[in-house]
Structures are given as structure tokens and as C-alpha cells.
Image: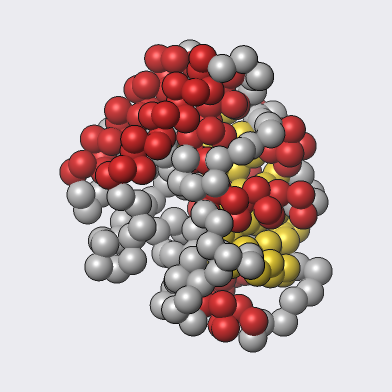
Amino acid sequence: MKLSVIMAAYNEKDTILTALQRVQAADISPWEKEIIIVDNCSTDGTREILQGLEQNEHLRIIFQPRNMGKGTSIRTAIPHCTGDYTIIQDADLEYDPFEWPLLLEKAVAEDLDAVYGSRTLGGRATYVYVQNYLGVRFLTWLTNLLFGTNYTDVATACKMVRTSVLKSLNLTCSGFDLDFELSNKLGKNGYRVGEVPITYRPRSLEEGKKIRPWDGLGAVRVILRDRFRSD
């Protein structure tokens, strides 16, 4: 059994190596692990750091020719994934890869097509900005209303999907809206999705957080598009 890890990086020179070391150190035995990093044309030194790393069968690094958005970076990596499941891991330190066994155990035990690491399951709310929390709650409510799903945290960046399913979804979004397109299409096609509670260490804008309020408007647009457009 193998887990593919997609890391999309853009201007994360202060965290990229620590994030990668945590991913490499995460014990998911008996699962194997492959890591695919896609640098989205970073300009702060991240690209140079990645260029200095040695690639092998467990680590592949792809360099985008220009800034094409996080969603495009994830879509670029998907065809290279060879694992049974694929998980998305940010290049910062907000999410802890040492919790991946929780997702893998649930996926195998319940034969699920996807497992999300939920930041709000059980009524938790760990956020720097209240508008971020309220935005996540609204977008989750809207997704559940329109797709008949039972997500508690549709916006989590910790999403693990069966690789064959992930490759079949025909994802098209280029930015942060891909998170919502993925959830929409899993729900619309009736795939089995579970959730487990995870820890979350949110960072501030000063620390490099890239999500902005207008990204929420893009998420709403994609949710409505996928609900009312016939594929």
C-alpha cells in the first residue's frame, strides 16, 4: 500500500524544509510514501531551496514556469501520483502529517473513497480570524445544502482521496477554489467520504497566510457552478 503526498508550494522559504521533514518523518507503516512537490514559481528563495534537494523514487519536485495558482499545482501533480490514496499537504506548518494514520485507518476500515481531516468536528474552533471560521461554517453549510453531503469542514486543506477517484474527477480550478470543487464533485458523484478530527495551528497574515476574504466569493461561485451545471 502506498500514499502519495502532494505539496504545493509558493513563497514558503521559512517553512518548506521543516514541512518536508515532517512529511518524511511521519510514520504511516505499513504504508509506503511518495512525495510530489510542485513549486508555483516562488520568488522568495523557496525555488532555490527545492532546487538544492536530491530527487529520488520517494521525492519528486516539479517547477512551474510561472505562477499558475495552488489548484493548478495540485492538478499538475495528480497524474504523477501512483499511491492507493493521495493526500494534499500544505507547505506550511498548519497541518500535522503525524496524524495521517488516523485518516488511513478510517479509509481502510470503512472502505472510503476520501477522508477529510476536520478542524471543526466536535464543535472545535481554532482560528486566528473569526471571519475565517464563519466563512468555513457558511461554505460547509452551503455545500451540504446543495449536494446532500455531511461535511463538517469543507475548506480543510487536509484531504485524502483514493487516487483512482481523484484522477477521474476532471478538476479544473486553478486557485484555492479547487478545495471546494473537489468536495463538490465527491458529493455530486456519490463517493463515500469520512472525516476525522485533527489539530490545526493557524497562522496569521504576518506569518504568511495567503487566504483572503475574496477567496470565499470564488468558493461560492464554484459551489453554485458545480451544483447547477451538468457534467
Q: How many numbered badges does the structure rendering display?
A: 0
Furthest-left residue in this view? 130
Q: Is residue 126 above or below residue 48?
A: above
Q: Is residue 2 above or below residue 140?
A: below
Residue beneath the point at 68% across and 67% down:
62
Where is residue 219 shown, x and y percent of the image? 41, 34
Q: Is residue 152 above or below residue 146?
A: below
Q: From the image, which quarter does the C terminus lie in?
A: top right
Residue beneath the point at 20% across and 49% down:
129
The reply, left or right, for residue 90 in relation to residue 203 is right
The reply, left or right, for residue 199 in relation to residue 160 is left
Q: Is residue 231 visible?
A: yes
Where is residue 65 shown, x and y percent of the image? 63, 67
Residue beneath the point at 47% across and 30% down:
222
Q: Report the front residue among 196 and 76.
A: 76
Residue beneath the point at 60% across and 55% down:
73
Q: Report the front residue among 17 and 76.
A: 76
Q: Is residue 29 visible?
A: no
Colouring scheme applied when the structure was drawn: secondary structure
Where is residue 176 shown, x and y percent of the image? 46, 46
Q: Quadrant of residue 121?
A: top left
Q: Quadrant of residue 134?
A: top left
Where is residue 223 shown, x and y percent of the image? 45, 26
The reply, left or right, for residue 82 in relation to residue 205 is right
Furthest-bottom residue in this view? 52
